[in-house]
Amino acid sequence: MIATVPGRGSLAAHGIEPAGEVHWHPTVSQLYMHTLVRGDGRLAEGGSIVVDTGIHTGRSPKDKFIVREPGSEARIAWGNVNAPVSEEHFEGLRDKVTARLGEGDVYVVDAFAGADPAHRIAVRVVTESPWHALFAKTLFIDPTEDELSRMAPDALVLHTPSVTADPDEDGTRSETFVVLHPSRSEVLIGGTFYAGEIKKSIFTLMNDRLPLEGVFPMHCSANVNDDGEVAVFFGLSGTGKTTLSAEPSRHLIGDDEHGWGSDGVFNVEGGCYAKVIRLSEEAEPEIYGTTRSFGTVLENVVVDEQGVLDLDDDAKTENTRAAYKLERIANALPTKRAGHPRSVVLLTADAFGILPPIARLTRDQALYWFLSGFTAKLAGTEIGVKEPQPTFSAGFGAPFLPQAPTVYARMLGSKLDRHGATVWLVNTGWTGGPFGEGSRMPIKATRALLDAALSGKLDGVEYRTDPTFGFEVPVEVDGVDTALLDPRSTWRDGDAYDRKAGDLARMFRENFTRFADEAGAAVTASGPGAGEPATPA
């Protein structure tokens, strides 16, 4: 049957004629009930719902495609990140997806992406899975009842995890597919139950659309103090974006996706998607509390027969996740919008133990580190990885950047020039040696350094210039062990530190060769020096 809702149109407009029931904008309770009745999830003590995403416990970046079509072809940076697929193959996959959506019950969620009305889009998610509908309802921004009655979708996600592709027939790499048609603002997802694909697909779409509107899209968290001073935190997974932005003394704007427009910063989302493996109630009480809350979706978290969660158990994956509404964090900013950043923080988890816990960057250094997007992959997290490996992800989110990374770097440079934000590099990784020898940077020290940076306490302190990387490092900060500020002094063997620092500098330069021409001489020259061993201070 075809179900319609006054003011919302019909699924027939999307080529879907469901044989089952259509659940338009269902409530959280309804989605819980349907998920539990179908056996797709379990109720945990405290009220969260626990689901299993099967073999896909993370995103499938090699199975992500962008349709090569006339309306967007010229601006897309084609390559390994943005792999092309033909319109013919897109239509073939779309037929498979809509056919599946026509076979049984479907769930429709209408919501917004973008808290700034001038730059938001109305998103419609149509899925065969009730818990994925709950995820979409949680991660996007709820419309009011009046807005809902008048909404017409600007973007459409057709989500059928049970549908698989035939690589020979559909032009895909495997049975999994995540396909974006930029001009039609349509996304097809199949062959994976990992819910993060839904939110990141819309973020990818926004990363293409917002620059056309003069808005800088950012893979970052953001918060603001009582005086309206905004800080944004760029970083890849595991570097602390969510943890450090949920600072009780500041108001949380959002934990992952933002735009920086003419009026300031705005959240793209209405919820958070936090990594929760080994989450500590003491270190992160507010995020910990969401794992015991009604409405939270927990992916791949271990739960026993009594419904008791074990956040320390990584039996399924290291990438356990919690999806919850932003309002679950007590200090969240209801408007999800604030002014222009005073501070820009670039987060890295350096598993080599080379970088200091904090450094101040010049404007050109900021663009260099932004384009580099450095963090380190740890030994043991992937088969065959026996020691830390550098990860360079441009813009701290290369998989989500449809256009060339230098497009976004230029926008960052323009924002810094206009608004004068101070840029900080913060290492949340290792000190005293590489992973396996040193120890993780104390989170208490990281928070103390960030507090000093964001409050202006570091403006007038003494700095030294790092001999290898060229950035400025404070010599002494109240409340922080001075030894931490000089990474070389924390190593047992200073010569070993010098050699590894030179190695890391060379990795940076080799990676940056692909940006050198477009980034320009000044930005390129602001990177690490000649790669000779660092001279002891």
Image (tube, grey):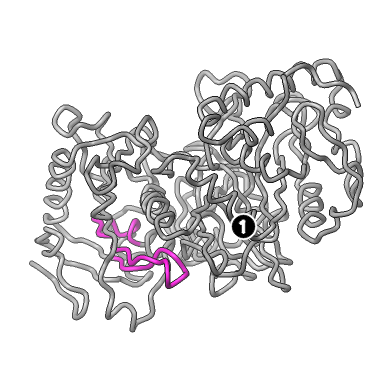
Question: Is 123 colored magenta in this rendering?
Answer: yes
Question: Is 254 colored magenta in this rendering?
Answer: no
Most extreme residue toward the bottom is: 146
Mark 1 surroundings within 10 Å by alpha-carbon count, few (fewer than 14), some (14 through 19), many (20 or more): some
Q: Which residue is painted at 61% across and 68% down in the image?
A: 339
Q: Position of residue 467 (x, y in %)?
A: 82, 27
User: Mark 1 belongs to which amino acid?
Assistant: Tyr
Q: Is residue 285 visible?
A: no
- Residue 253 quadrant: bottom right
Q: From what the image shows, is residue 510 above or below residue 322?
A: above
- Residue annotated with mark 1: 288
Q: Position of residue 78 (x, y in %)?
A: 34, 34
Q: Which residue is painted at 14% across and 45% down in the image?
A: 91
The quarter of the picture where the C terminus appears is top right
Q: Is residue 324 visible?
A: yes
Q: From what the image shows, is residue 314 above or below residue 423?
A: above
Pick whichever, 270 or 34, lies toward us.
270
Q: Is residue 342 left or right of residue 400?
A: right
Q: Which residues are magenta?
A: 109-133
Pick whichever, 15 or 263, lies toward us.
263
- Residue 381 quadrant: top right
Q: Which residue is painted at 59% across and 24% down in the image?
A: 389
